[in-house]
Amino acid sequence: MESLRDSGVVVTGGGGGIGAAYARRFAAEGARVAVNDLDADKARAVAAEIGGIAVPGDASTVVPAAREALGGRIDTFCANAGVAPHGGPEAAEELWEGAWDVNVMAHVRAARELVPGWLADGGGRFVATVSAAGILTMLGSAPYSVTKHAALAFAEWLSATYRHRGVDVHAVCPQGVRTDMLAGTGPAGDLVLAETAIEPEAVADALFAAMDERRFLVLPHPETAGYYAARAGDPDRWLGGMNKMQRKLEAVLEADGAPAPGGAAPAADADGRTGAAS
Ligand SMILES: NC(=O)c1ccc[n+]([C@@H]2O[C@H](COP(=O)([O-])OP(=O)(O)OC[C@H]3O[C@@H](n4cnc5c(N)ncnc54)[C@H](O)[C@@H]3O)[C@@H](O)[C@H]2O)c1
């Protein structure tokens, strides 16, 4: 991909998982990559591995330091850092705020810094790692589902508003991906996601295919498109299918002696795979 050679790329949450896979892939294409993560050691390790630059810290405030580290210009910004707290409305206020801050406002704050420059000098690329939870739902985590819907809405808004002015936007919406986040979802997550979970590198492959085609929506699990259509076409049938899966999970957790989830939480991105109305 010639256009990436020597371009400046930032990946937030790039110290592991999907972000590290993005960082490796951009570096392999000849880009100069600034690797951001709250975990400074992880950011440094990935940056050292790929010949990139570590820019540790909060994803919300990374743009100025990353721009300087890349010599003045950011061509591609991957808003990838995310958190997946468990629970429903009863989840603590701090968990809701934390999810809102990283999963949504970090994207807004980055775009606020980047878009004026892109409009003035020929454009740029904004990659939002959303989730299938952003187009469906994630059983067990209301904060994740709500904030990922908002992240997708923001990415759509950016694309609708600026695509004719050189800003390419991609929303990446995987179901389960084998990362620390998925491992943190425990046995119920394994139960729901094991069958279809993919490696982070497959998410990077899907993103790069979409970049080649200048395509907005990136579905590393192609079946997500069918669930998305089912949700739009017959919401009650789709919700019935989701609720059936919720009841299955409650039965499994009860059999394991775990507390039944009223909001407690089985799985990152159980949403997509179980999203078909059934
Ligand atoms: N793993 C999945 O099943 C899955 C599925 C769909 C979407 N996603 C999304 O993919 C993205 C990456 O997640 P992952 O699965 O690679 O998880 P991960 O836990 O391996 O990586 C997330 C990284 O983000 C970093 N981070 C968290 N908050 C940060 C902040 N405020 N500033 C900077 N860095 C921060 C963490 O330290 C971590 O290294 C997230 O947005 C997640 O919601 C994951």
Image (spheres, rainbow, N blue to C red):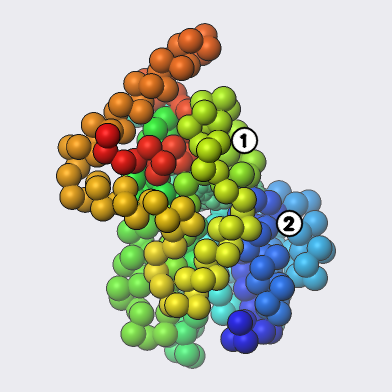
- Is 232 left or right of 223, judged from the image as shown? left
The mark found on residue 11 in the picture is none
Q: Nearer the viewer, residue 185 or 54?
A: 185
Q: Residue at x 52, y 9 (%)?
A: 257
Q: Where's the N terminus, which quadrant?
A: bottom right
User: What label sits on residue 183 in the rendered view?
Assistant: 1
Residue closest to the eye, 72 or 10: 10
Q: Amino acid at mark 2?
A: Ala
- Give the image location of residue 238, x and y in percent: 24, 39
Position of 197 relative to 74 (above/below): above
Left or right of 177? Residue 158 is left
Is disc 1 placed on a helix, strand or loop?
Answer: helix
Q: How many residues crowd around disc 1 within 10 Å: few (fewer than 14), some, or many (20 or more)?
A: some
Residue receiving disc 2: 43
| Residue 142, percent from left and from top | 38, 35
What residue is at 62 percent from the left and 87 percent from the top?
2
Determine if residue 92 is in view: no
Could you tell me the amino acid type at mark 1?
A: Ala
Tell me the quadrant of the picture where the C terminus can be found: top left
Residue 33 as seen in the image, left or right of residue 182: right
Q: Marks 2 and 1: which is nearer the front? A: 1
Q: Give the mark nearer the N terminus: 2 vs 1.
A: 2
Looking at the image, which residue sits at the far bottom? 121
The reply to whether the C-beta atoms of the residues labelled 2 and 1 are less than 8 Å apart is no
Instruction: Identify the residue at image location x=51%, y=43%.
Output: 196
Residue at horizontal 64 percent and vertical 41 percent from the top = 180
Tell me where residue 42 appears, x and y as whole percent: 75, 52
Are there few (<14), some (14-19), or many (20+) residues within 10 Å of tag 2?
A: many
Q: Secondary structure at mark 2?
A: helix
